[in-house]
Every structure is written in C-alpha cells, then in structure tokens.
C-alpha cells in the first residue's frame, strides 16, 4: 500500500460528460491535462490515460491516488470511468477520491462571491443541478438533484452564475426570469475538467475521505429505466460524502 502521508501523484479522470479528459496532479498542483479524442469514452478514455502518463514520464506504479468524477452525467460514460478506475486501482490498492461532477463543474467558474450553479443536461426536459455559495469550503445552497428549469429557477436568487451545458440549454430563460445579476458560462469555458476533479479529489484525500476500488460506484441521481421499473423510484437515495477508511 502506498504511503498516504507522502506527496501525492494523483491521476484524475472526467468522463461524466461529452468532454472526456484526464489530468495529473502533484498534491494540488497541475502537472498536465489531456482532453480525449472525440468519440465514446469506452474508446477514448484509456488511450488518453496512457498518453498522459507517457507525456509526463510517469508509470502507473508511481501514482499514489486516483480521483474520478462519479456523476451525475451520462450513464454509459460514468460506468466506463468507474470501470477504468477500478481496473487501475484494484491490484495496487490505490485510494480513490469519488468527486461530484457538479462540484467539479462549479470549479470552472473563477473565484466569485456570486452563487455558482452547475447545470448538466438530464434529458426529458430536466437538468442535473446544484448551487454553491463561495468560500474556502463552499456552502451548498441548493442540493444536487434533478430539476425542471422552473423548479430550479424557484430556488435561485441573483447574483449567480449558471455554468455548464445546462446553462446553454435553459440558462437564458432562467436569467430572464430572475432579472439582473445572472451570468452564463456555457461550454467550452463552462465544462467539467479533469484538473478540477483532481483538485477536489486532493482536498478529499487530505481529509482522509477516500474509497477502495470495490466500494466505488457511480452516482446517477436519476435511476435508469430498468431500475425505475424494479424499485418504483425515479431517483437514487441521497448519498453522503466518502468516509475516512
């Protein structure tokens, strides 16, 4: 087992959205980041990891931890990311930091005293969203959930920044309803990136909040249709943060 008190060489993966990327951090400092080629994560993610490590002159054995975006996002891409991390970490026993995709997306916004509202397309006229107040430890103003644009709008007050693909889909309508003081940051600037997954993962690891490979699972928020039929519930139960192992 790697000495978790030594400086961390952290591999971070973001595959929850269409913009798949991987990053390498030394403690909290970015070493390098690669955006994967266009195409399904199942085809592009592992080659991007290999290219990143090769470019940085780093072997898998040199890593001390992995951070991964666990959702919400694309069901298929999340499963690919989780499976990839499990494959990388299972034999080595590397600690894994499971990072909220929405929290990582919020990091796309430069430091601000506005409320930051990360938004992803959840299909069916809904969005995955949350809202955070600025600070050294951002306060959750609106919990992660699946919202209609109207339901999210009712929970927000300006000034705020709407960030992500959801901002491109319905941000203008929300901004018009809320009035002045609403800014939009759609992609490409407003997208989840592996470097932000890594930064949040490093913070979690410093608090001792990590998982082993066998414990890692995606956080979909909304259940797949087969699960809805099986359980009668549309949404996953609320999930707390990773606990110190």
Image (cartoon, rainbow, N blue to C red):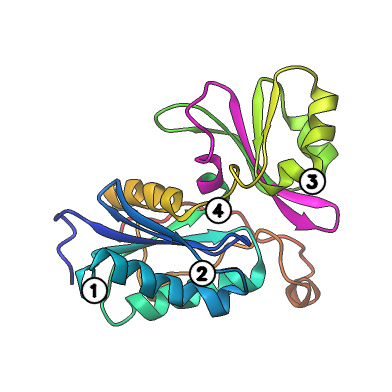
- Residue that carries the numbered disc 4 in the rendered image: 101
- Asked which quadrant contains residue 218, the reply is bottom right
Over which residues does the magenta segment extend?
104-128
Q: Badge 2, how many Cα within 10 Å: few under 14, some, many 20+?
A: some
Query: Residue 238 in the image: x percent, y percent?
Result: 60, 54
Disc with the residue nearer the chain's start (3 vs 2): 3
The reply to whether callout 1 and callout 4 are in contact (CB within 8 Å) is no
The C terminus, quarter of image:
bottom left
In the image, is residue 174 above or below residue 105? above
- Residue that carries the numbered disc 3 in the rendered image: 169
- Front-lying residue, 240 or 33: 33
User: Left of 244 or right of it: where is 45?
Assistant: right
Disc with the residue nearer the chain's start (1 vs 4): 1
User: Left of 132 or right of it: where is 33?
Assistant: left
- Residue that carries the numbered disc 1 in the rendered image: 59
User: Residue at 53% across / 75% down in the picture?
Assistant: 44
- Residue that carries the numbered disc 2 in the rendered image: 217
């Amino acid at each position: 087992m790697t000495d978790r008190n030594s400086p961390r060489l952290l591999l971070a993966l973001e595959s929850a959205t269409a913009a798949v990327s991987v990053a390498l951090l030394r403690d909290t400092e970015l070493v390098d980041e690669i955006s994967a080629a266009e195409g399904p994560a199942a085809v592009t993610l592992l080659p991007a990891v290999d290219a990143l490590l090769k470019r940085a002159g780093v072997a898998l054995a040199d890593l001390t931890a992995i951070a991964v975006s666990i959702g919400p996002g694309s069901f298929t891409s999340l499963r690919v990311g989780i499976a990839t991390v499990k494959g990388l970490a299972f034999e080595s026993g590397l600690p894994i930091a499971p990072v909220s995709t929405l929290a990582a997306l919020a990091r796309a916004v430069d430091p601000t005293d506005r409320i930051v509202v990360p938004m992803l397309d959840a299909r069916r006229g809904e969005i995955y969203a949350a809202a955070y107040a600025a600070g050294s430890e951002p306060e959750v103003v609106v919990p992660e959930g699946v919202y209609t644009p109207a339901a999210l709008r009712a929970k927000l007050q300006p000034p705020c920044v709407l960030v992500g693909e959801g901002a491109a889909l319905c941000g203008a309508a929300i901004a018009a309803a809320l009035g002045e003081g609403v800014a939009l940051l759609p992609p490409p600037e407003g997208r989840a990136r592996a470097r932000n997954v890594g930064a949040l993962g490093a913070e979690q690891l410093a608090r001792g909040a990590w998982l082993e490979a066998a414990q890692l699972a995606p956080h979909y928020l909304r259940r797949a249709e087969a699960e809805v039929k099986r359980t009668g519930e549309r949404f996953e139960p609320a999930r707390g943060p990773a606990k110190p192992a």
